[in-house]
Image (tube, grey):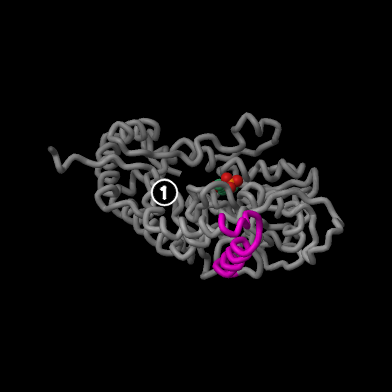
Amino acid sequence: MNITHPPSVPFNDLGRAHADLRDAFDEAWTDLINKAGFIGGDPVERFERKWASYCQTRHCIGVSDGTAALELALLELGVRPGDEVIVPANTFIATVEAVDAIGAVTVFADVDPDTLLLSAETFEEAITSRTTAVIPVHLHGRICPMDTINDVARRHSLIVVEDAAQAHGAQLRGLKAGSQSHAGCFSFYPGKNLGAFGDAGAIVTNDTLLADRIRSRVNHGRPANGSAQCLRLGGNHRLDALQAAILEIKLPHLDHWNASRRGIVQRYRETLDNSIAIFPNAPENSIGAAHVAAVLVPDRDRVRRRLSEARIATGIHYPIPCHRQPACAHLKTRALPVVEHAADRLLSLPLFPQMTRVETNAVIDRLSAVLSTTDPRQSEWQP
Ligand SMILES: *Cc1c(COP(=O)(O)O)cnc(C)c1O
């Protein structure tokens, strides 16, 4: 027996988050079966109210998933086929799919080298006479500088939709992610900071007319007054009652889970050699949601292999930037040097709220050892 043998470290472990909440989940599930209220009803209305309040917005509309949230927000805000929508190229492909789904055209923007987020500068560079909207993506849980982005958008009369799928609870100057634009879009995919037991999403907004339009489109065009007359055609993009019930149980834990995530990332930052493991910075006056512990390292694929040999799981968000995806080959694109630089070097370390000190130390020890033997061609890999 060797008690000093380092543990294997998973990338994420949802089981640990759920263990303590098992009784509440069982009770909610039993209640749902007893009432047979699987679509809409109290669980959905209650979660929508609580999520709007958490995000400091007037309205929340629960939807089927985060991709639908983005698509519906763009559509109901009036983005039309052929319009150009600016998207940072280092996002999950879903942001681009939402633009494509309504017939609009994605125009890729580069990102700030310090934060790896869309900035007012990289956004403004991508504006043309056909631009009607922009989607700032709060990547890895760092919130974009919404104040300066909104200034540029106002000057050009553009729609702003936040992709907050990785930023539940992140704040800029005390304002929550999702509340600082025409509409904020969330995913509750199981692995997100607030995750359901399947697919789920939400749109938050302060615009009452927009909220009504989205609400009716989500539910077959039905009017809010319950009338049987369909004045418009919608679709089915509803949030399940089961998912709403699960999310309501998990919501009170979001803030302390996020604090724990931030603590782990902080330890990574403080302990790893910051001349060789470079963590992107968060914009000033912001508190991130620490969704992913992404760090720039040289010779990334070798580092990743060595960690895997030590049974430490890692990820890459994202290995192929959207503008390099074969599916986006038809989209014209400018040079995006920062996105490309980051795509070759980003490594995501294990991160989940219940991660133990022993596990965090195992990651730090192993990664430090690997980085100390990394070929020093480092000067040109830094942004
Ligand atoms: C997860 C995610 C989405 C899509 O959400 P789904 O619920 O999986 O459809 C969109 N954008 C970003 C940045 C994401 O991380």
Q: Position of residue 13 (x, y in %)?
A: 38, 46
Query: Does 105 sit left or right of 233 as displayed?
Result: left
Q: Looking at the image, which is closer to me, 345 or 366?
A: 366
Task: Pick the quarter of the image with the N terminus.
Answer: top left
Choose top left, top right, bottom left or bottom right for residue 186. Answer: bottom right
Looking at the image, which residue is at 44% across and 41% down? 346
Segment colored magenta:
33-56
Q: Which residue is painted at 44% across and 55% down in the image?
A: 290
On the question of residue 13 being in view, the answer is: yes
Q: Kindly give the residue lying farthest to the front in the view shown.
A: 34
Where is residue 202 drawn, in percent x and y? 62, 56
Residue 282, image x, y percentages:
47, 57
Q: Residue 123 at x, y = what percent?
A: 64, 52
Q: Residue at x 78, y 51 (%)?
A: 234
Residue nearest the viewer, comparing 183 with 121: 183
Residue wearing tag 1? 14
Q: In this image, 97 relative to 50: left or right?
A: right
